[in-house]
Image (spheres, rainbow, N blue to C red):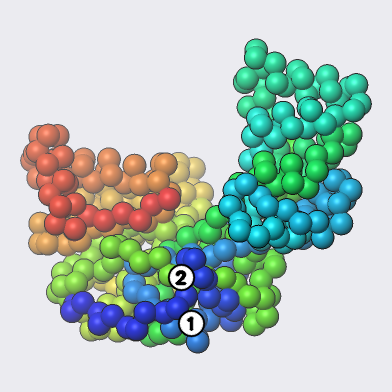
Amino acid sequence: MSAPTPGPVSEFSKDRPFPAKLSENRLLNKPGSAKETRHFVVDLRGSGLHYKAGDSLGIFPSNRPAEVREILQRLGATGDELVSPAALKLAEPMVLREALTSRLALSKPTRRAVEVLAAKATRTGEKAQLAGLLAPESKDVLMAFLEHREFVDLVAEFPSARPSPQELVDQLRKLMPRLYSIASSPKPHPSDVHLTVAIVRYKTNARDRVGVCSSFLSDRAHVGQTPVPVFVSHSHFGPPENDVADCIMVGPGTGIAPFRAFVQERAATGATGRNWLFFGDQKRGTDFLYEEEWQDYLARGQLTRLDTAFSRDQLLKVYVQDRMRENAAELWAWLQGGAHFYVCGDAKRMAKDVDVALHEIVVEQGGLSLAQATDYVKQLKKEKRYQRDVY
């Protein structure tokens, strides 16, 4: 595969995101699933932005309006007050409501925020509780307390402690963009980007919480209406440049996203290298993301192998690394034949488990010592034949 010819540079970037619109928002899981995974299509027309398979899309979300309203009400503020949040280093002040809605993170309060409240509290009980949390011997207690709270909890639980708008925003971090692996290739989709997003919803301290960006996309960014500020984050992660090279892809859950892009790309370019996909999730009946597409690629011969691991469909949980071990001999043969090996998804457990399985397969099938297997895998990385997009 020849390197793509760079297009003209867009005027839009991380520092000046493009106000895109969603053209599609659909649920991928079927009824009965314990998960909420959505497919979004972001319209890039008019942006001048270009992407390649393997890149990510950066999105600047906004916070929930109800949460912003509650904080303003608890502070006794109108939202029209001018503030200069320390985290933003602004040349000119901005309106408090805008700062709380789209510029500052309302989660993960710090010890310093509790200290500010303690200095402002006027009720005896609140002062005593805050002093107790700040006592030197209460370090672990304070950490546990803050872990289950966001800023809205603090202003609700200590109503007599009313910091000024400026004092509040000085305790808030900058609201950072979120990066999502792009689930489409620009070959068939030059003017839009597809995303595969797990919508985060949970409860702590008797309050419903959400992932700021995933819920922004699913609940607050109305199709065709709401501006979604975006930029393209370019990556070295991508399908083999050599069209005849084989491609092994391990992407459970939303880790499937870039591999949907890879297969689209290789199908569009007529790459003759084989494609082998390992996918896993909870239940085949409800969580087989893009099942019809994969079956279609299989039928057309554009996907050579598809091995799935649905952890909740049997008594003993089965994961993608288990499927790798079951197919160790063939996986080793592909690697020996020059295949590229890719992993995308959860960094904490899955990617580590897959890496362990890969080393075991190299030891077992290659008849190598652990040290030799480690060197073999290092060489794969050096040759860019082992790449990971993990988070």
- Badge 1 is on which residue? 47
The answer to whether residue 299 is seen in the rendering is no
Residue 42 x, y percent position in the rendering: 53, 77
Q: Residue furthest right?
A: 123
Q: Badge 1, how many Cα within 10 Å: few under 14, some, many 20+?
A: some
Q: Amino acid at mark 1?
A: Ser
Q: Nearer the viewer, residue 172 or 69?
A: 172
Q: Amino acid at mark 2?
A: Ser
Q: Residue furthest top?
A: 137
| 75 versus 9 height, above or below | above
- Badge 2 is on which residue? 13
Say which element carries label 2. loop
Q: Nearer the viewer, residue 114 or 200?
A: 114
Left or right: where does residue 52 sit relative to residue 132?
Answer: left
| 123 versus 270 height, above or below | above
Identify the image quadrant of residue 374: top left
Q: Nearer the viewer, residue 170 or 382?
A: 170
Could you tell me which residue is drawn at 59 percent across and 79 percent down? 21
The answer to whether residue 228 is seen in the rendering is yes
Could you tell me which residue is drawn at 57 percent across and 70 percent down? 229
Distance from disc 1 to disc 2, alpha carbons, whole Å, reads: 10 Å
Q: Badge 2, how many Cα within 10 Å: few under 14, some, many 20+?
A: some
In primary-sequence order, the first of circles 1 and 2 is 2
Residue 317 x, y percent position in the rendering: 45, 44
Q: Are marks 1 and 2 in contact (CB under 8 Å)?
A: no
Residue 328 x, y percent position in the rendering: 21, 50
Identify the image quadrant of residue 349: top left
Left or right: where does residue 211 sit relative to residue 367?
Answer: right
Quarter of the N terminus within the rendering: bottom left
The tally of labels here is: 2
